[in-house]
Image (tube, grey):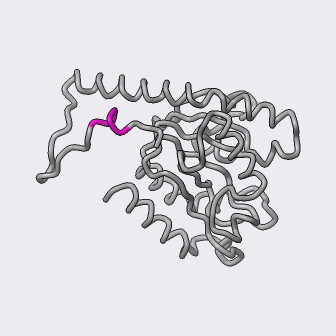
Amino acid sequence: MGPEASLARVADEVRGCTRCPLAARRTLAVPGEGNVLSDVLLVGEGPGAREDATGRPFVGPAGQLLDELLATIGWRRDDVFITNVVKCRPPGNRDPAPEEQAACAGYLERQEAALDPAVVVTLGRHSLQRYLPGARIGAVHGQLRRSFSGLHVFPMYHPAAALHQATLAETLFRDVRGLPAALLAARQAIEAERVASVEVGEVAVPVHGVEPDPDPAEQMTLF
């Protein structure tokens, strides 16, 4: 199954999900959207009121700021894939509870597997904690890090926080300017690891008549 079909299946399941109490309060679940071939996955925290009403991520004021941030580096929303740690709106836009995050964790894991991103951009501290447990956003924002699972992670503040604090907006715009270089560094690291694995004889072998995936280097485009 290709990434588009895999992501569509996850989205269908999310829309009908009743795994946690958030489902009873939602208008629409928000699975995520974007370019299924992108090397960049943006992960926020949870939907807000506008997202709950439309079923789309980051379409309220924070989403408008996110669009501005991407435009700063010449990117658009359809150049990346955007989702959240939880797929339904927490009441009053409160922080997602641990049990709510756990209920949605499998969906996000499957989205990660389908997209196979070179970089995961975390937006906010709850997203950060999923990938870099114990990290403080004030200490790691704007820096490329490696998660325990091997993912390259680029932490950023959540755009919603910057709407209420001008200094955070300045930080966000400064950090996002480093994202293209972080993406390039992640791609280079992935390619170097691929070459090293081939050199030690870890060459993919067809299984049950299925050909190996194409060279990842050929697939690593932004969109």
In the rendered structure, the answer to whether residue 219 lies left or right of residue 58 reads left
**Residue 217 on the magenta segment:** yes
Give coordinates of residue 29: x percent, y percent. Answer: 62, 69
**What residue do we see at 62% from left, 55% from top?**
84
Quadrant in the rendering for residue 19:
bottom right
Along the line of sight, which residue is nearer the eye, 81 or 153?
81
Give coordinates of residue 198: x percent, y percent. Answer: 23, 26
Image: 129 above or below 114:
above
Quadrant in the rendering for residue 30:
bottom right
**What residue do we see at 20% from left, 32% from top?**
203
Image: 102 above or below 214:
below
In the rendered structure, the answer to whether residue 27 lies left or right of residue 221 reads right
Along the line of sight, which residue is nearer the eye, 41 or 134?
41
**Residue 25 on the magenta segment:** no
* View extreme (bottom): residue: 24
Quadrant position of the N terminus in the picture: bottom left
Give coordinates of residue 36: x percent, y percent. Answer: 45, 52
Image: 220 above or below 105:
above
* View extreme (left): residue: 209
**The magenta segment:** 215-219
Give coordinates of residue 193: x percent, y percent. Answer: 35, 26
Magenta residues: mostly which secondary structure?
A: helix
In the rendered structure, the answer to whether residue 203 lies left or right of residue 61 reads left
Image mark count = 0
